[in-house]
Image: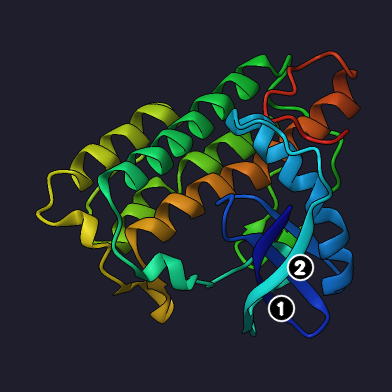
Amino acid sequence: MKTKCFWEHNGDDSLLYSTEYLGAFTRGKSVDIAKLKMPQEIKSFIRWSGINCPKEEVKIEIAEEKVSDLNICDADSDAIFHTETLSMTISQYEILKSLALKSANDFLILYNAIPSKNISCLPQRKTFYGAVPRTAQEMYEHTKNVNDYYFGEIGVACDNDGDILSCRERGFALVEKQQNFLENKVLEGSYKELWSLKKLLRRFIWHDRIHAKAMYRMAIKKFGCNSVPNIFYFDD
């Protein structure tokens, strides 16, 4: 199976995104390292999303590339795929929305399963957005609270009230009230970054996946291998 990827990089640091399984990604100190990780990431993502896992070998094809001056090593990104600039059908939108909502729901299930939400075994570290979330509580709040930011980038006024699933559901309900939202217009958001509805859908799934992976790995290290469900099917 061949899968197309978008390569965003700053020097040797690389982020590799699947442009077909939106939200699946890998990072590496080189593109070759990121490419080596991608087949397992694709299989993990397929299992999580409910698609039958392919038996054949996954081969990576770089379809698009962006040279960035962002902190790629910290998953800072302003990429927009060519496919994220095209209009969508209602079917395409509903599929991606269902995955974005499933991701929020599964993130909430994982968070609620953490035995103690305010302790961590992770070291302190800073990135471009400040201190890296270390506890389950910090990871959850950080992941939930991009809701108003992401929706705001496509001109939808939203909030972060309630849990991660309910505030995301409200955001999509507001999107759907906009006339011609399936045109998927490309807008210039904060820091001159280009956004679209389809990019927003991918970014939610991607951002959830980053922090769900960190939360899951922290939990099994701190509380034991069977302490929380591997609901995202991460590779241990």
Compared to residue 217, the image places residue 133 above or below, namely below
How many residues crowd mark 1 within 10 Å: few (<14), some (14–19), many (20+)? many
Look at 19% across and 55% down and name the residue there. 181
Compared to residue 175, the image places residue 95 above or below, namely above
Compared to residue 115, the image places residue 194 above or below, namely below
Would residue 218 be seen by someone viewing this image from the given angle? yes
Look at 49% across and 32% down and name the residue there. 104
Residue 42 rendering spot, x and y as whole percentages = 72, 46
Q: Is 158 displayed left or right of 132 in the figure?
A: left
Residue 171 rendering spot, x and y as whole percentages = 28, 41
How many residues crowd mark 2 within 10 Å: few (<14), some (14–19), many (20+)? some
Q: Which residue is mark 1?
A: 9
Compared to residue 47, the image places residue 40 above or below, namely below
Q: CA distance from mark 2 to mark 1?
A: 9 Å
Image quadrant where residue 211 sits: top right
The number of discs equals: 2
Tell me which amino acid carries mark 2.
Cys
Tell me which amino acid carries mark 1.
His
Image quadrant where residue 40 sits: top right
Upstream in sequence: badge 2 or badge 1? 1
Q: Nearer the viewer, residue 206 or 96?
A: 96
Q: Which residue is mark 2?
A: 73
Q: Secondary structure at mark 1?
A: strand
